[in-house]
Every structure is written in structure tokens, then in C-alpha cells.
Amino acid sequence: MKFLVDAEDRARRRSPGMGLTTDANLNQNIKFFGQDWSRQRAMILTVTHLHEHLGQLIAYARSNNVTPPWSRQQ
């Protein structure tokens, strides 16, 4: 499904930026949507936002009779 490929591609492009975050710089301020945010706050928002989209994708897939891999019977 194209939407899953697109979602994975977007997540992959965001990952390198998250990899720049360390314990030492979690409280460092960065520009996030034009505002000063700590890296930690930006990461929490990003992860929870992606979690919301994952839930939407699972609901969409199931409504189209697509069973997520972790729910498939072997």
C-alpha cells in the first residue's frame, strides 16, 4: 500500500535529526515550528504525533480488511 511506503519514507527522513539528540543536549533549545523548544519537548511531540498516525493507519488498514503483521495467525 502506497500510504505505508510514504509513511515509512517520512519517518526515515526524520530519524537522522533525532539521532543528533543526546542526554547532554536534551535541554538545548532548538527552533521547532518557528518557536524555541527544548530538544526533549520536540522529540516528545514528534513521537506522540507519529503514534497518533500509526493508530490511524492501523484503523484504516483494518477497515480495508488488511490485517497488521503482528495480528496475523501463522
Image (spheres, grey):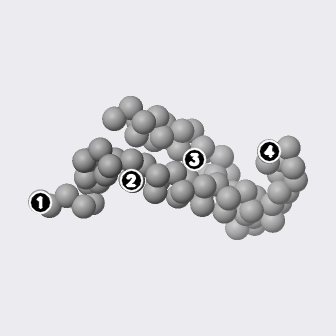
Q: Which residue is mark 3?
A: 15
Query: Which residue is painted at 26% across and 47% down in the image?
Result: 66
Q: Which residue is mark 1?
A: 74
Q: Which residue is mark 2?
A: 58
Q: In the visual, does 36 lie left or right of 2?
A: right
Give amino acid for label 1: Gln
Callout 1 secondary element? loop
Comparing 64 with 11, the one in front is 64
Q: In the visual, does 44 lie left or right of 38?
A: left
Considering every residue shown, the one lying at the far left of the view is 74
Q: Residues within 10 Å of mark 4 (few under 14, many from 20)?
A: few
Q: Which residue is mark 4?
A: 33
Callout 3 secondary element? helix
Sequence order check, earlier mark of 4 and 3: 3
Query: Which residue is painted at 81% across and 60% down in the image?
Result: 38
Q: Are marks 1 and 4 in contact (CB under 8 Å)?
A: no
- Residue 68, image x and y in percent? 29, 54
